[in-house]
Amino acid sequence: MRSVKTPLSRRALISSAVGTGVAGAVLLGSDTSASALTSGDLQVTGSTRAFALGEQRSASLLSTDGLGTGLTTVSVDVDGGHMIGVTFPSGASTDTVSLRVKTATGSWTTWRDVPLNDSEPDPDTAEGRRSVTASDPLWVGALGTGATVQVRLPSADVHDAHLQLVDAGESTTLARRTLDAAQPLATKASPRVLPQPAIKTRAQWGADESLRKGGVSYSDTIKACVVHHTADGGTYSQAEVPSVIRGMYRYHTVSLGWSDLGYNFVVDRFGGIWEGRAGGITQPVIGAHAGGFNLDTFGVSMMGDFTSVAPSAACLESVAQVIAWKLSTYGLPADGVAYLTSAGGGTAKYSPGTTVKLRTINAHRDVGYTACPGNVGFTKMDWIRGRVGQLLGGATTTAIDAKYQAIGGAGNIGGPTTPENDTPNGSGSYRFYSGGAIYWSKATGAHTVRGAILALWGQLGWENGLGYPTTDDSPAKGGFYNHFQGGSIYWSPATGAHEVRGAIRLKWAAMGWEGGPAGFPVTGDRQAAGGWFTHFQGGSIYYSAKTGARWTTGAIRDRWAALGWERGLGFPTIDDTKTPNGKGYFNVFEKGNVYWSPATGAHAVAGDYLDAYGALGWENSWLGFPTRDAYSVDGGTRVDFEGGSLTWSRTTDQITAKKK
C-alpha cells in the first residue's frame, strides 16, 4: 500500500514529469454495471466500465518514459462517458495519477493531477473494508464516440490499475422536480435554529437509489464540519451539475465499493446546495469524506479544483449558509472546539484511538494528509468561519439551549442528535442528545430525561401521556427518578423503570417515597377490578374511588392475594395496622379482615364470623388471633382461633363460640 506520510512530494514528482511511453489498455467488460432505474416518474440511466491498464491490445507496454522517472502513459480508446478515475484493487505506490482526454474531433486537454483516496470511509467499517485504493474522479464532460483517455502513473502500478469510465446517464424528471430556490427541503423551519437554505434533493440530481449498499449509518451527534473540494475541474455548466453529482455518486458506489456518495452536502460554483449521502439532511449521517474522522462530522464539498483558483463568491456563501444552518441545529458555534477520536487508516493524520482537539469548522487537510480543499480553497477557511459566525449570530438562544449549557453541555448529556423541535401537540419543545433529552414547556420549564426513564416515558405517550417533566432526572436512594405533570417515573437497577400516578403516588410520597417501607415500584400503575394498584418492593398500594389509596404488605398482602385480591375480599379500606394489643397486624377489607401474628400467621375472618369475632372483643378476647381460615365441618363451617373456634351450623344458621 502507498505511504501517507509524504503525499505532496510524490504528487509534485509526478506533476513535473514530461514525455512518456505510450501503451494500450484492454476493456474488462462493456457496461458491466449499467443501470436504468425507474421509480415513480423518476428515470435514471448510467453505466460504469473498467479497463485493465496492464493488459495490452497491440503495442508492447513501455516500462519507462525514457527520462528515468519510472512513469508510464497508457492510452485507452473509449466511447461515451463523462467522468474518469483510476482504481488499484491491490493498493498503489503513488498518491497521484495524471489524466487527460481527447475527443474524436478535439485536441488533448492539459494533464490533470488527481490525488488518490482524498476522501474515504473509516477503515473499521463495512464500507471501509469494501473500499479500494483509487483516485478522485475527474469530470471531463461528454466524451462521445472515438475518444481517448491517457493515464500517467508509476510503471510499478500499471498492472494493478483500472481506468474507470463513468457515464452519468440522464434523469428525465429533473426539470419537473426542480424546486423554487426559496423552497426549503424540510417541511417546517424551527424558530430556534437558522432558517434552512434551499437544498436540492437527491431526486433532483437523479440519484439511482439501487446503487446504494446497505443501510444508512448514523453518529450519535454532530461535533464538527469538514470542508472539501472535489479536486475536479470547474468547467461544468449549471445544467451539467446534476450529471456531475451522478457521476461522483456512481464512481463512489460502483467503482470504489462505497455505500453511497461520500459527501453529506455538495455545493456547486453557482451557489447551488445539493443533498449528498442519504439518511436525512438534519441527521448525523456518517459519510465517507474524511478518512478516520467521519464519525460525528459532516462533509461539505465544493465542486471544483481550488488548488490555484478561488471558489466563486456564490459557492462560498452557500457553503457558509449550509454549515451555519447545520451547526445551528446541533447548537454548535462557528469558532468552537471539537474533540474527535481518529479511526486511523488511509490519509488520516492521526493513528487509531488518538483523540484530537479540532475546530468545529475544519478543512480536510486539518485531519488528513491531503491538499484538500486546495491551496487557494484553504485560504478561504477563515472567511467561511467568520461568515458562519455572522449567520449564527441571528440564531435564537432558547430555554433548551440555556439548560444544555447550564448543566455542562456535552460533558453532561452528550452532543445533540436532533434539532430542537416543537412537540406534536404544539405546547412545548424538545431536543435529543446522545445521553438523553431536554423537554420544555412554558408551564414546567426545561428539564432533562434520560435512559430507561426516557424510554418508558416515550412508551407512555411522551408529553401526551404523563405530561412534561417538572424535574430533571435526579438521584433517588439507589436509583433515579423524574417527576412529570401527571405522575413520576422511578428507576433502580433491581426494579427497572415504572410509573406511579395519582392517589397511589400521593400515598407513596406520604410514606417516604422509595426511602419508606414501600421501596421502589416494581410495576407501573395497573388497573384492578374497579380501581388501580401499584406493586412495590415492600408491598402494594391499592386504590378505588370508594376506599382511597391503601397500603398492604407482607403476609397480610400475600393472604389477601391468595384469596383473589380485590376480587375476593375487595379493596383494603385502611393501611395494614398494628392491633391494639400490639401482638400483630390486621387490615380491614371491604368483605372481611386479615389478621396476622408471629405465632399464627395470616388468616382471614369474614362475613358473620367477623361480626361474632368483633362482638367477643376481636383478638383481645379469649379467642385471640385466627389460626385457620373458614373450612368445612359436618353440618357447617368453622374458623379456628388460638383460644377456641367459631362454628356456623347449617341447621340453625347460628354461630357458636367454643373454647379449647
Image (cartoon, rainbow, N blue to C red):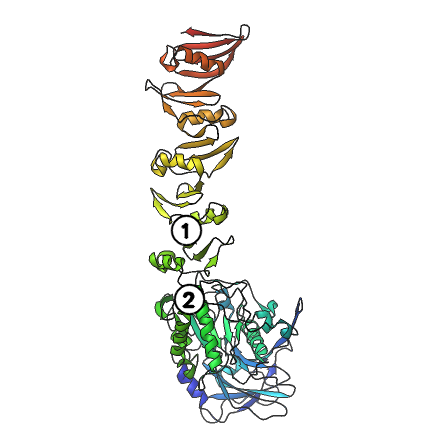
Image coordinates for residue 274, horizontal then vertical, percent = 53, 73
The tag earlier along the polypeptide, 1 or 2, is: 2
Pick the front one: 582 or 45: 582
Determine whether, in the image, residue 33 is placed left or right of residue 111.
Answer: right
Residue 497 in view, yes or no: no
- Residue 439 picture location, percent across and down: 43, 53
444 on left or right of 169: left
Q: Which residue is mark 2?
A: 395
Nearer to us: label 1 or label 2: 2
User: Height in image: 517 above or below 93?
Assistant: above
The location of residue 545, given as percent across then percent down, is: 48, 30
Q: SS at mark 1?
A: loop
Residue under label 1, please give it: 450
Figure quadrant of the C terminus: top left
Q: Quadrant of residue 508?
A: top left
Among all residues in the image, which is located at the extreme left? 582
Residue ID at (40%, 34%): 507
Q: Quadrant of residue 201?
A: bottom right
Q: Amino acid at mark 1?
A: Arg
- Please state which amino acid type lies under the numbered disc 2: Ala
